[in-house]
Image (spheres, rainbow, N blue to C red):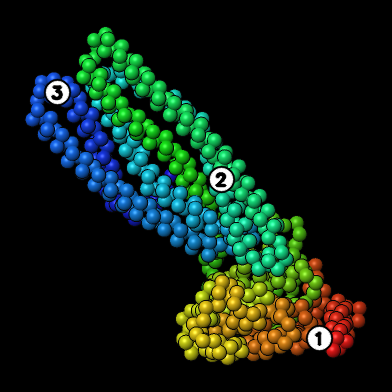
Amino acid sequence: MLKRFVSYYKPYRKLFIADMIASLFMSLSGMVYPVISRSMLNDFIPNRKYELIIRFGIALLVIYIIRALLNYFISYYGHVMGVKMQSDMRKELFSKIERLPYSFFDNHETGSIMSRLTNDLFEVSELAHHGPENIFMSILSIVIAFVYLSGISLPLTLIIFSCVPIMMVIAIKLRGYMRNASRRSKAAISKINANISSSISGVRVTKAFNNDEIELNKFLDSDDEFVKARTMHFKGFSLFNVSTSFIIDIFNVVTLISGGIFLYNGKISFGDYSAFIVSISLFTSPVMKLVQFTEQFEEGASGFERFIEIIDTPIEADREDAKEYRLEGNIEFENVSFAYEGHEDKEVLDGVSFKVNKGETIALVGPSGGGKTTICHLLPRFYNYESGSIRIDGHDINDVRMHSLRENIGIVQQDVFLFSGTFYENILYGKPDATYEEVIAASKKANIFDYIESLPNGFDTQIGERGVKLSGGQKQRLSIARVFLKNPSILILDEATSALDNTTELLIQEALDSLRQGRTTIVVAHRLSTIKNADKILVIANGRIKEEGNHEELLKKEDGIYHSLYEAQFKESISEIDSKLMMQ
């Protein structure tokens, strides 16, 4: 762990060395005042050496000016180094997060991940800056203090330093407790961030259901956990601080009594005794700095451990022999089985097999939880299947580089995610290197060009966070424009119109019909009326294909699942029409 932490200093080793040299001179300059004080007490003042008093006083002032400049260098450039290291770690962590598999995000909340990117790495950067210089300056100062004080009186110095082992025992005893407290505290902060992120994202739902009290209670529960964790955290550090501070207070008592006895017995002069009393801070100050640093060390160390946890999480990876392909869209599932991580005893897919030829449209229907969306997630390798094989144009998808695979697949989902920004930026997401003309053409094909042009700022109009300023239909057409721009050979429509009203659905359906032309398409549909013209319909239930055929063939099976689903939806449609007629 230490070796990995030290590796982040490598790009800034010159600045680090300069910081350590400045720290060295800071520690050495701290010795000047006690040395001069001893000389004044033992020689200059008793012997009335007025000129030397003035000269040494001026020299001390010059040294303090240099010390101030060194302190500025350490404070400013040390923090700059820490921030740059924090930036390096954040970039590495964010890059890693972007390459983690879907399963990671199934088990980690957004707020928790954000906490590691911000709070944890801030603590790490503070450790990176203050850690080496605090340890270096403190240990060096203690060594120098020991040498200097020994020169005054070795027996008295040994008596004072005999308290150090007691402090070491206290530190070792409490270290494990403090580390656990720090980790629990960071976990509690992550939970609060996760709750806040969830509540703010869903604030409109909260208001719609008038459930602000529920969200407040959820927040208060996580906040209570945070208070308990921080209480445990402060208890450990308070015990440590109080214990070490008490021992340092004992130093002063021991120094006063021992020095007084030594002075009484003539084993030390009054000047040396006075210098020893003045110089004892050379020892106590760095010891206190180490005590205070202990808390920062535990915070930074636990933050770095949480950082490493994600860095060491396996990423989505290609096989070494995987290749780039331009896929045309001949898809084949052969005896594919799959279960989600943590639910291995419950297979979502069980021996699923089917084929889709280039340019064909296949529809997946059936009850919720049957495995339809899972099939759509396996094709672009969002998850890795357990057994069987999935092939496109005869290539096992595990033999195709993920970038190449996903470049050939376009997805339109029911829950559209849009990024904060403009219409233009969100459409361009489908093909970042596209020209302005290509973006315009894609918006026209998606039937959203006229709406965008009617706005005062046109394509430069901000859509708000997650497209909050847009209707469901406008969001969907914007997502379709992205896929038009991407121009994939394979298209996945995962209940793309199920959340829309009938009128909007017709507009979206026109855009989708245009999008499907010449592409192999997999449609997950709730409304069976939208997939009548599919080349093939698969009825999925309990992870298996129960029925297969086109619309007419499946309707002929009067005791079949598809026939029952269609009849149920047809009766609902008739009922809705009758209700509207009765209201008129």
Res 60 visible: yes
Q: Residue at x 86, y 84 (%)?
A: 579
Q: Residue at x 27, y 10 (%)?
A: 264
Q: Amino acid at mark 3?
A: Ile
Q: Which mark is residue 45?
A: 3
Q: Amino acid at mark 2?
A: Ser
Of residues 187 and 392, the one drawn nearer to the viewer in this rendering: 187
Quadrant of the rendered image containing residue 372: bottom right
Q: Residue at x 52, y 50 (%)?
A: 306
Of residues 162 and 14, the one drawn nearer to the viewer in this rendering: 162
Name the residue carrying label 2. Answer: 185
Q: Which mark is residue 551?
A: 1
Q: Position of residue 356 (x, y in %)?
A: 70, 81
> Along the polypeptide, which appears first: circle 2 or circle 3?
3
Q: Amino acid at mark 1?
A: His
Label 2 to label 1: alpha-carbon separation: 58 Å
> Along the polypeptide, which appears first: circle 2 or circle 1?
2
Q: Of tags 2 and 1, which is closer to the observer?
A: 2
Judge left or right: residue 508 versus residue 481.
Answer: right
Q: Residue at x 27, y 26 (%)?
A: 278
Q: Quadrant of the C terminus?
A: bottom right
Secondary structure at numbered mark 2:
helix
